Image (spheres, rainbow, N blue to C red):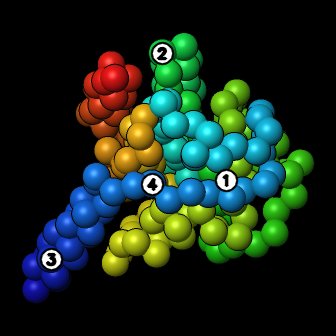
Amino acid sequence: MFLLSTLICAMFFAFSAESLIGTSAPEWSNDRWINSGPLQLSQLRGKVIFIRFFMDSTCPFCRASAPHLNELHETYKGQGLVVIGMYTPKPEPRPTGTRLVQQYVKDYGFSFPVAVDDDWATLKRFWLDRVSAADYTSVSFLIDKKGVIRFIHPGGVYSKEDVGVIKKRIEELISQR
């Protein structure tokens, strides 16, 4: 019975996340940024955007994913990709100082723009308010040049296969006019 209910939940989750593909990405309104001045999604039209929600440097999922984010940024930044980190404190929203987030950014070696989303407003707008079940808050979104969501990694660690799919999708979106 447990296996059946787990399978049903997983199928429902996949359907919910999948239903966001092809929809317009919501705007964000974060005013504190590291490695950049404040950015808006609307300012980035014409660019492919990869957003990863992450937490402090003690998170094993975030630590394991950070090298891949840095690689995506370095490999594709000159080709039209903008990698954006969205810092979300865990286990729940709470005021977080910019200096602390700067330390996490340094720990991860991020040189791309990182927004402080300590109230989880952007995480909620993109993910938690739009899916019925979310196992992780460390979700990633790939957004095309027109602001449409084209791929979602639902969180946790990127597998080797995940990284391959992400790179392939980025390359496809970059090459589109």
Nearest to N terminus: mark 2 or mark 1? 2
Given the image, on which type of amino acid does mark 2 rest? Answer: Gln
Quadrant location of the N terminus in the rendered image: bottom left
Q: Secondary structure at mark 2?
A: helix
Left or right: 51 in relation to 37: left
Given the image, on which type of amino acid does mark 1 rest? Answer: Tyr
- In the image, residue 147 lies at what x, y percent? 44, 45
To which quarter of the image does residue 7 belong?
Answer: bottom left
- Residue 156 visible in the snapshot: no
Which class describes the residues within 10 Å of circle 4: few (<14), some (14-19), or many (20+)?
Answer: many
Mark 2 or mark 1, whichever is nearer to me: 2
C-alpha span from label 2 to label 1: 25 Å
C-alpha span from label 3 to label 4: 27 Å
- Return the mark for residue 8: 3
Nearest to N terminus: mark 4 or mark 2? 4
C-alpha span from label 1 to label 4: 18 Å
Residue topped by disc 4: 25
Closer to us: 30 or 63: 30
Residue at image location 89% in from the left, 48% down from the top: 99
Residue at image location 15% in from the left, 76% down from the top: 8
Left or right: 152 in relation to 81: left
Given the image, on which type of amino acid does mark 4 rest? Answer: Ala
Mark 1 or mark 4, whichever is nearer to me: 4
- In the image, residue 123 lies at what x, y percent? 55, 63
- In the image, residue 114 lies at what x, y percent? 69, 42
Say if mark 2 contacts mark 3, CB within 8 Å.
Answer: no
- Return the mark for residue 79: 2
Nearest to N terminus: mark 3 or mark 4? 3
Which class describes the residues within 10 Å of circle 1: few (<14), some (14-19), or many (20+)?
Answer: many
Q: Secondary structure at mark 1?
A: strand
Residue topped by disc 1: 87
Residue at image location 76% in from the left, 72% down from the top: 94
